[in-house]
Image (tube, helix red, strand yellow):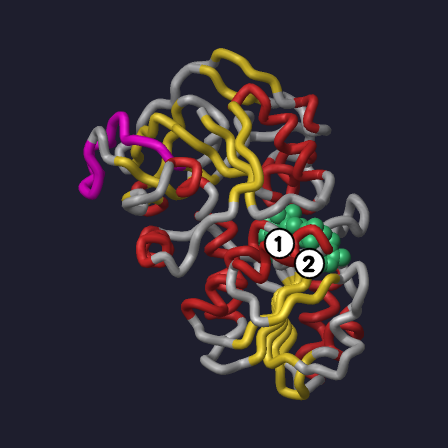
Amino acid sequence: MKAMVQEVYGPADVLQLRDIDKPVVGDDDVLIRVRAAGVDPSVWHLMTGLPYPIRIMGFGLRTPKLRVRGWDVAGSVEAVGRNVTRFRPGDEVFGTCEGSFAEYACAHEDRLAAKPSGSTFEQAAAVPISAFTALHSLRDQGRIRRGQRVLVIGAGGGVGTYAVQLAKAVFETEVTGVCSTEKTEMVRSLGADHVIDYTRDDFAADGRRYDLILDTAGNRPLSHLRRALTPRGTLVLVGGEGGGRWLGGLHRALGALALSPFVGQNLRAPFVKEPKEDILQSLAEFLEAGSVTPVIDRTYPLSEAPDAIRHWELGHTRGKLVLTV
Ligand SMILES: NC(=O)c1ccc[n+]([C@@H]2O[C@H](COP(=O)([O-])OP(=O)(O)OC[C@H]3O[C@@H](n4cnc5c(N)ncnc54)[C@H](OP(=O)(O)O)[C@@H]3O)[C@@H](O)[C@H]2O)c1
């Protein structure tokens, strides 16, 4: 099968389209004929091996242990392992797996759900990690409640576009999105009640205070973010690119976790894992109900995965990028 393979850590050029063996389906696994694969920041981190702590976390010290990139996947079931009960060949599924930038990939059964009816493979592949990060950050970390004032920083990005829609349509809050000039209309169309163009205005300077801030971009200092938070408000940091090869954006996360016990505000910096089947099903229901619609900036063929990643590196992706396979 064709797959985007890397032998060494490095920039997007390290990804090469090669012919490799199809994965062998394990007893608890589902072999998927991949039709679309999502591109998200974790792909870049695993491609570059940065920041360095991720190498110690088990992804390979000197070279990547997993040679094929990509987590988010949508496709049809080709074969199932002997313990798999929920899927049969031909079923259309979405979820996460190791190595979705390939014609075939193996996923654990509990990392998959039926593809939302009415969604394309591209739309379904744009959902799992980013939408789950938004849902988990707002609901489980942020304890979002109806009627609250919610600020989403990075509202035009992969996580932010889902966060705005979830905060408005599912949790019924008053949503303010922060994005660049080119994305203000799009963020408004996703349901934001207010939109702040960060190239012109500072959200912490207009006196408005938020019960919940979800920060996905911009690396603003904690003091800046806390100024815009109510005295008992919650800040959830998920974003943090830049910041050097050792810490990446982790310095703010560590600062937030260290400070939180000593202040009235709740400062959180979760490490969001992959969504399991029940979460994927909830996300599918949101799509089917029309409360959430994936925003796809561009699709690229599998062979152009390096270009997709270079596009993401520019830092202004509108929603998600997706590979078609
Ligand atoms: N903690 C976890 O487990 C977890 C899980 C998933 C993702 N993440 C992290 O979450 C972050 C966001 O992920 P993503 O997929 O949404 O990335 P993304 O698609 O690249 O979106 C980031 C968005 O931020 C906007 N942006 C850039 N500079 C900004 C600024 N100064 N102020 C406000 N917005 C700005 C960009 O658009 P415009 O500038 O054009 O508005 C871009 O659309 C990444 O750092 C990722 O690593 C963490």
* Image side of residue 71 versus residue 87, left or right: right
View extreme (top): residue: 19
* Image side of residue 29 versus residue 225, left or right: left
Residue at x 68% of width, y 80% of height: 229
Classify 10 Å Cα crowding around label 2: few (below 14), some (14-19), many (20 and above): many
Q: Identify the disc placed on residue 308.
A: none
- Which quadrant of the figure contains the N terminus? top left
Compute the Cα span from label 2 to label 1: 6 Å
In percent of width and height, residue 114 lies at 28, 44
Above or below residue 295? Residue 145 is below
Question: SS for tag 2?
Answer: strand
Q: Is mark 2 within 8 Å of ligand 1?
A: yes
Q: Is residue 240 visible?
A: no
Residue under label 2, please give it: 179
Q: Which residues are magenta?
A: 74-88
Above or below residue 293? Residue 205 is below
Q: Amino acid at mark 2?
A: Cys
Q: Identify the disc placed on residue 156.
A: 1
- Mark 2 or mark 1, which has the lower sequence index? 1
Q: Are marks 2 and 1 in contact (CB under 8 Å)?
A: yes
In percent of width and height, residue 112 lies at 33, 44
In this view, the residue in front, 197 or 302, is: 197
* Image side of residue 177 versus residue 241, left or right: left
In this view, the residue in front, 238 or 62, is: 238
Q: Amino acid at mark 1?
A: Gly
